[in-house]
Image (tube, helix red, strand yellow):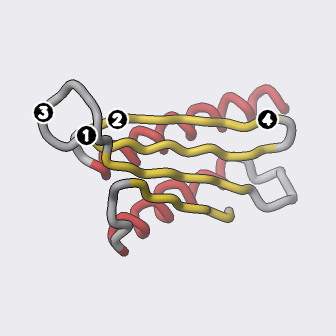
Amino acid sequence: MRITIKATNLDLTPTIKKAIEEKIGTLDRFIPDINMPLDAFVEVALETRHHQKGNIYYAEASIKVPGKVLRSEAREKNIYKAINTVKDELQRLLKKYKEKKV
C-alpha cells in the first residue's frame, strides 16, 4: 500500500509516521484479491479552533479501491488514539467492501 502523509499544525515525528505506516499499511490484507497497489492518503493535525480545552488531534484517512473511496476521520485528545480509531473504521469499511464484491 502506498501511503501519503500530511501533517497540519503538527510536527510529523518519526514515531507518528511509524504509527501511521504500521496501522494503515496493514489494511491492504483485508482485500487481497485486488491486483493493483492501493493508495492511502492520511492527514493528521492539531486543531486550532475547537470548543474543548487542551489539544485536540484530528486524523483522517482515505483509501482508493476500485470503484470507490473509503474515508474515515476522528478527533481525539491523543494522536495515536485518533489514528487507531481511523484504522478501526477503515478496517470495518474494507470488510464491508469485500463482502459486497464477493
Q: Are the two marked residues, 2 and 1, in contact with CB atoms closer than 8 angstroms?
A: yes
Residue at x 74% of width, y 56% of height: 38
Left or right: residue 52 versus residue 44 is left
Q: Earlier in the sequence, mark 3 or mark 4?
A: 3
Left or right: residue 58 versus residue 73 is left
Q: Secondary structure at mark 3?
A: loop
Residue 18 x, y percent position in the rendering: 42, 69
Residue type for callout 4: Lys
Q: Secondary structure at mark 2?
A: strand
Residue topped by disc 3: 53
Q: Earlier in the sequence, mark 2 or mark 1?
A: 1
Residue type for callout 1: Ile
Residue topped by disc 2: 75
Q: Are the two marked residues, 3 and 1, in contact with CB atoms closer than 8 angstroms?
A: no
Residue type for callout 3: Lys
Which mark identifies residue 68? 4
Foreground: disc 4 or disc 2: 2
Q: Secondary structure at mark 1?
A: loop
Residue 53 x, y percent position in the rendering: 12, 33
The alpha-carbon separation of the residues under discs 4 and 1 comes to: 29 Å
The alpha-carbon separation of the residues under discs 3 and 4 comes to: 37 Å
Q: Earlier in the sequence, mark 2 or mark 3?
A: 3
100, above or below 33, in the image = above
Residue topped by disc 1: 56
**For the view shown, which residue lies furthest in the bottom direction?**
14
The alpha-carbon separation of the residues under discs 3 and 1 comes to: 8 Å
Q: Earlier in the sequence, mark 4 or mark 2?
A: 4
Residue 84 x, y percent position in the rendering: 39, 45
The alpha-carbon separation of the residues under discs 2 and 1 comes to: 7 Å
| Crowd rating for badge 1 (residues with CA inside 10 Å; few <14, some 14–19, many 20+) | some
